[in-house]
Image (spheres, rainbow, N blue to C red):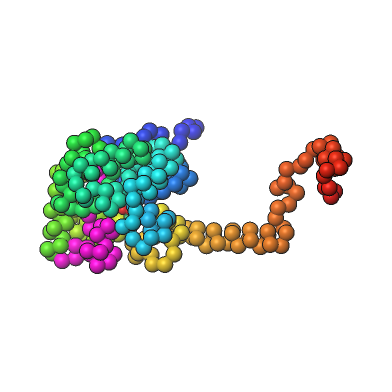
Amino acid sequence: MSTVSALPQRKITLLTLQAKKDRGEPITMLTAYDFPTARALDRAGVDSILVGDSLGMVVLGYDTTIPVTMEDMLHHARAVSRGAKIAHLIGDMPFMSYQTSVEDAVRNAGRFLKDGGMNAVKLEGGREIVPAVRAIVAAGIPVVGHIGLTPQKVNQLGGFRTQGKSAAAARTLIEDAHALQDAGCHLLVLEAIPDRLAALITQRLAIPTIGIGAGAACGGQVLVTHDLLGMTDGFTPKFVKRYANLGEEIARGVGAYVEDVSSGRFPEAIHAQPLDEDVFRALTRESDFRIAR
Ligand code: KIV
């Protein structure tokens, strides 16, 4: 019987993802911000790993993604690229790394590939970012678009709320989706929009859509890993499905450690390094030392 693993052995590229879409196979994407998580996701066979600027909220403790910097993102992108060798790696361009000028956008996108080990970058926004997308793609850097709820615009949107609910808003999103595809995006994230609108956009585009809170018709799905593993406190969006409760498991393990250390049950002899008997004797004979046996 063959023992060949079912997991993908070759690096997943934008061509692999497009071929999956063309075959009607859903694409899997999750976020990661560190080496061990990236390694676990890669081993589990996730197609694509997004080093999201959600880093700011789930790892750095900010209320929004606004304070996240290029240096924050590159630091975590490097850790993820050391852990994941198969998945398609996407670095999320943080607030004000691409909005200020097309030159800044290209320079910062390039840093994700040169210094961060990423394969592509993601930008939030519609038609207004088309010049930046075109220039980044022209520089040879694959770009993922992101429309719908775009968290970097939380102050303009008035909160983290579903987008595209009216006919006018839905039409704008459809036009944005086409504009981003035409500008050269190879994937498009649809966040928090009605499922039938996401289905319409998905049908109209040749590139895969990746949904988060956008229903089942998208070409693939992405979630924030800390949400699905139960490592986030407070509000959890309705579109998140919990697959584990690691937050409780961590609290249980750490609580047991605190009890063991406090009561003297840890460490035991098996956790210690023995000192050679002759060395110990020599030390205890030396008059300078007063070592109790
Ligand atoms: O930053 C992020 O994690 C994201 C996903 C939610 C798509 O943009």
Q: Is residue 213 magenta?
A: no
Residue sticking out furthest to the front: 288
Residue drawn at x 85%, y 40% is 286
Which residue: 46% across, 33% down? 4
Q: Residue at x 25, y 37 (%)?
A: 141
Task: Tell me where residue 239 appears, x and y as whole percent.
Answer: 33, 62
Q: Is residue 32 left or right of residue 272?
A: left
Q: Position of residue 85 (x, y in %)?
A: 41, 36
Residue 180: tell me if it is visible. Answer: no
The picture places residue 157, in percent across and down from the top left corner, at: 23, 64
What residue appears at the point 26 percent right and 62 percent down from the top-left corner?
A: 154
Q: Is residue 209 above or below residue 11?
A: below
User: Relative to residue 58, is residue 9 depicted above or below?
Assistant: above
The answer to which of 92 and 249 lies nearer the viewer is 92
215 displayed left or right of 271? left
* Relative image position of residue 287 (x, y in whole percent): 86, 42
The stretch in magenta equals 143-166
Image-quadrant location for residue 224: bottom left
Figure label count = 0
**Residue 102 appears in the rendering:** yes
| Observer-nearest of 74 and 46 | 74
